[in-house]
Amino acid sequence: MPDIHPTALVAPGARLADSVSVGPYCIVGEGSVLGEGVRLVSHVVIDGLTEIGQDTVVHPFAVLGGEPQHLGHKGEPTRLVIGARNQIREHVTFHTGTVAGGGVTRVGSDGLFMVASHVAHDCIVGDHVVMANNATLAGHVQIGDHVFMGGLCAVHQWTRVGRQSFIGGLCPVTKDVIPFGSVWGNPASLEGLNLVGLKRRGLARETINDLRSAYRLLFADEGTLQERLEDVGRLFAASPEVSEIVDFIRADASRPLCLPGE
């Protein structure tokens, strides 16, 4: 049986695994699904059609599954799906999706969401993501795996942030960030590769060298970006990591690309 504190309010329709712990003064709504080992520390609100994966810990005053902050939302039943083993700290907010955006906000597994970070409607957040204090995602943002977002940064709606990239603190991100990129400043500028993160992830020296060479060629002064993109795609076709950057840039996108020196 779930361990539910006497002061907590759990709606009859909520589904809680046997090993769930619901602390003092928590509220768990009708459509909530809490997996094995989920722990709500205290004063947590789980609302809407919200699923939380196993062994996720949610700290006081977090609100997960609130309605989207979107003028077009008319109360339709939309969802929030959160993966496993996340650490969700105080005052964090995740909102459900919108009908226009597909109806689901998705957050991956093994993330750390620090105090007052926010994931808006229809976002897709990958695994092993770290959002520092007050980091904010607007609607429809896509965040790849192993992204680190510094405190008080903010990402514009519909922006893509490629995997294993780094976003500096206090940084407004209004353009797409390439995989493995490092971005900071106001306005945000691509300042190179996330070399610290790549080394921590254990990428081989040869892979990092290929990425550095491809980066220098891709953002050189000669020719057009499209011409340089074709050259990089041809010269580094054997590198999956470089090909990932090329494919990211070639993909259809709603936002322009974040470039060096902006």
Image (spheres, grey):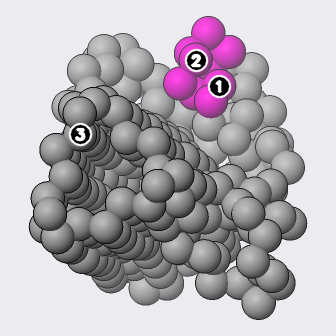
Binning the other alpha carbons within 10 Å of mark 1 as few (below 14), some (14 to 19) or many (20 upward) gives some
Q: Identify the amino acid type marked 1.
A: Ser
Q: Identify the amino acid type marked 2.
A: Pro
| Residue sitting farthest toward the bottom | 71
Displayed quadrant of residue 68: bottom right
Pointer 1: what residue?
243
Q: Is residue 197 left or right of residue 226?
A: left
| Element assignment for label 1 | helix
| Element assignment for label 3 | loop
- The picture places residue 220, in percent across and down from the top left corner, at 60, 51
Mark positioned earlier in the residue sequence (3 or 2): 3
Pointer 3: what residue?
2
Pointer 2: what residue?
240
Q: Magenta residues?
A: 236-244
- Does 51 appear above or below 137? above
Q: Residue at x 58, y 17 (%)?
A: 240
Q: Residue at x 71, y 61 (%)?
A: 78
Q: Residue at x 31, y 67 (%)?
A: 9
